[in-house]
Amino acid sequence: MPRFALTVIRHGETRLNKEKIIQGQGVDAPLSETGFRQAAAAGQFLSNVQFTHAFSSDLTRTKQTIHGILEKSRFCKDMAVKYDSRLRERMYGVAEGRPLSELRAMARAAGEECPMFTPPGGETVEQVKMRGKDFFDFICQLILDKTGQRESYSPGAPGHCLGSSLAEVFPVGKHVSLGSNPEGGALGLAASVLVVSHGAYMRSLFGYFLSDLRCSLPATRDKFELSSITPNTGISVFIIDCEEACKPSIQCVCMNLQDHLNGATDKH
């Protein structure tokens, strides 16, 4: 049963984030100066983590963020990034380009809570969730296919290095069950996947992990945190065990981590 790490990061700040303007898919704003600093800080924080795959939404703010991260990497500076439209932000229809306060007013007028409200022309929460499920299933199958191509996969040196580099940065040992792992303490990862996406999309994806896949959380985290919007360049890490024709098993290592931002956005 191959095991892999999934590191999911929200893009850096844009001017419209700061001004609380809805961007969705139709407003393709670039990162602000603060956003570029956040991406560089995340890259520095992750510089010793070895990734085997890198995926990003195909919108400008996520592209700029993942390149800001990878250019700081010791191991992945030249890694090819795959842009995937399934990682795009939720589509907000007529609310795109308008203040968040207007979206909330629309939801109130419809008698609904804002996160669940669908503006005219927008995606429903369920549609976003299904996009996330589709992408996640794709990743799991990709890892299964990769490991299946090897005559005999075992979590030896490459997997040990992937797991060790992750454990140097994140509290993997505290929150991940090693089970009967023959490494006896190493994670034995088949892959380490980096994904950069968007706040509302990530909330739907993490909700799928929790509600459908019964993702286990660290004791210091609760379900509310999985349903909150990730801050700009907030980092969440999951360890996934996948098997053909079975639901993956997911363990959360950390959620919405912001340690890298200490002092990173103080400069003006």
Image (cartoon, rainbow, N blue to C red):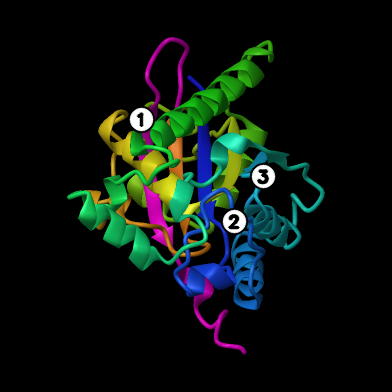
Q: CA distance from mark 1 to mark 2?
A: 45 Å
Could you say which quadrant of the image residue 161 lies in?
A: top right
Q: How many angstroms separate mark 1 from mark 3 (CA)?
A: 37 Å
Check residue 87 in the rendering and tell me which mark sits there, or answer none.
Answer: none
Labels 3 & 2 near each other (Cβ < 8 A): no
The amino acid type, in three-letter code, at marker 3 is: Asp
Which is more foreground, mark 1 or mark 2?
A: 2
Secondary structure under tag 2 reads loop
Instruction: Tally the marks.
Output: 3
Residue highlighted by disc 2: 27
Which numbered disc flags the more N-terminal residue, 3 or 2?
2
Foreground of the two, 56 or 125: 125
Note whether 109 is above or below 134 in the view shown: below
- Residues in magenta? 241-268
Which sits in the foreground, 255 or 211?
A: 211
- Give me the residue at 62% from left, 44% from top: 57
**Callout 1: SS:** loop
Viewer can see residue 236: no
Is residue 204 shown to the viewer in this render? yes
Asked if the residues shown at circle 1 and circle 2 are in contact, with their CB atoms under 8 angstroms apart, the answer is: no
N-terminal-most mark, 1 or 3: 3
Residue occupied by mark 1: 179
Q: Would you call the spot at circle 3 few (<14 residues within 10 Å), some (14-19), or many (20 or more)?
A: many
In this picture, is 140 found above or below 117? above
Q: Secondary structure at mark 3?
A: loop
Q: Which residue is mark 3?
A: 58
In the image, residue 237 above or below residue 1? below
Mark 1 or 2, nearer chain start: 2
Q: Nearer the viewer, residue 150 or 52?
A: 52
